């Protein structure tokens, strides 16, 4: 309980970052691991999800009210993400996560470089190119839902990038769509963590209040300042995530 002020601050910042550009876990999960060293990883992640799902839900609701969610894309993606998040969680038992880290690092570098050097990327809504939007949305939800259930870090950033690149959304609407998909993957994770007792409810709900506050501020700023603001927060968060992955690969934990 003495660590609650630190965790509340981390949840506030995580809610803000996640509401704008994804990547709140980059702030909140390390804070929980630091504050709760004696807890099992599953308990840390379950407590994180309780906080995150309420902040994400609030942000999704605000985006839906103010700009509208792109349901044709976000709906199918959320449904398949929920199902495949379960599959990703089950895969943890037999596939080491260290196999995934180098690939994620390469993908994050590519996302940052592409976004920085394509100033027009995600600045305006454009017509999507290719076949059925719903089928592609189901595929994107399946891949990123599986990744979020299996590993997680960077999932929100990958979702935003995919919605811009594959469906022609601007960064603001891509962020809104990502919130709905994140809501589905968080719900899938909690369907496992809650029945198995891997949630510290007092800490999780206390953090949730501050996560929601951060989400309110973040979503309001994103809606007010538009895709340009979301784009640069997205770049900064992606760069921070890339740096963390690189550090973890070069200096792995004992």
Image (tube, rainbow, N blue to C red):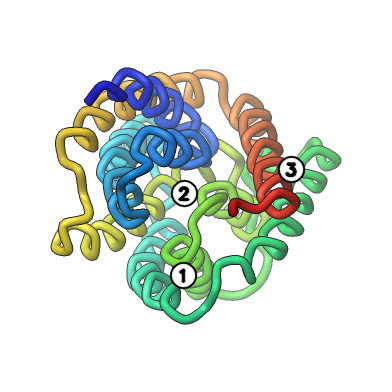
**Image height of 78 relative to 161, above or below:** below
Which percent across, then down, holds residue 223? 47, 25
Which mark is drawn over residue 146?
Answer: 1
Which percent across, then down, holds residue 135? 50, 75
Q: Residues within 10 Å of mark 3 (few under 14, many from 20)?
A: many
* Between discs 3 and 2, the one toward the N terminus: 3
Find disc 2 in the rendering and name its residue: 178
Q: Nearer the viewer, mark 2 or mark 1?
A: 1
Find disc 3 in the rendering and name its residue: 121
109 or 203: nearer the eye?
Answer: 203
Q: CA distance from mark 2 to mark 1?
A: 15 Å
SS under mark 2: helix
Which percent across, then down, holds residue 225? 56, 20
* Between discs 1 and 3, the one toward the N terminus: 3
SS under mark 3: loop
Outermost residue toward the front in this view: 254
Q: CA distance from mark 3 to mark 2?
A: 17 Å
The residue shown at (44%, 73%) is 92
Give residue 1's quadrant in the image.
top left
Which percent across, then down, holds residue 127? 64, 55
């Amino acid at each position: 309980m003495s660590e609650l002020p630190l965790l509340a601050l981390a949840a506030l910042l995580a809610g803000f970052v996640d509401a704008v550009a994804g990547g709140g876990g980059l702030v909140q999960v390390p804070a929980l691991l630091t504050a709760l060293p004696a807890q099992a990883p599953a308990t840390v992640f379950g407590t994180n999800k309780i906080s995150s799902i309420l902040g994400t839900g609030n942000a999704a609701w605000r985006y839906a009210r103010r700009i509208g969610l792109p349901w044709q894309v976000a709906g199918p993606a959320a449904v398949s993400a929920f199902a495949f998040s379960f599959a990703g969680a089950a895969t943890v038992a037999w596939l080491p996560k260290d196999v995934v880290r180098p690939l994620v690092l390469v993908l994050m570098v590519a996302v940052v470089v592409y976004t920085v050097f394509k100033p027009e990327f995600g600045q305006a809504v454009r017509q999507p190119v290719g076949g059925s939007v719903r089928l592609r949305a189901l595929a994107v939800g399946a891949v990123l839902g599986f990744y979020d259930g299996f590993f997680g870090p960077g999932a929100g950033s990958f979702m935003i990038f995919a919605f811009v690149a594959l469906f022609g959304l601007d960064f603001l609407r891509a962020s809104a769509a990502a919130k709905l998909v994140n809501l589905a993957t968080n719900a899938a994770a909690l369907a496992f963590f809650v029945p198995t007792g891997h949630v510290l409810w007092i800490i999780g709900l206390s953090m949730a209040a501050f996560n929601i506050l951060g989400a309110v501020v973040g979503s309001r700023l994103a809606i007010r300042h538009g895709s340009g603001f979301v784009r640069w927060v997205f770049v900064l968060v992606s760069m921070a995530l890339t740096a963390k992955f690189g550090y973890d690969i070069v200096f792995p934990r004992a």
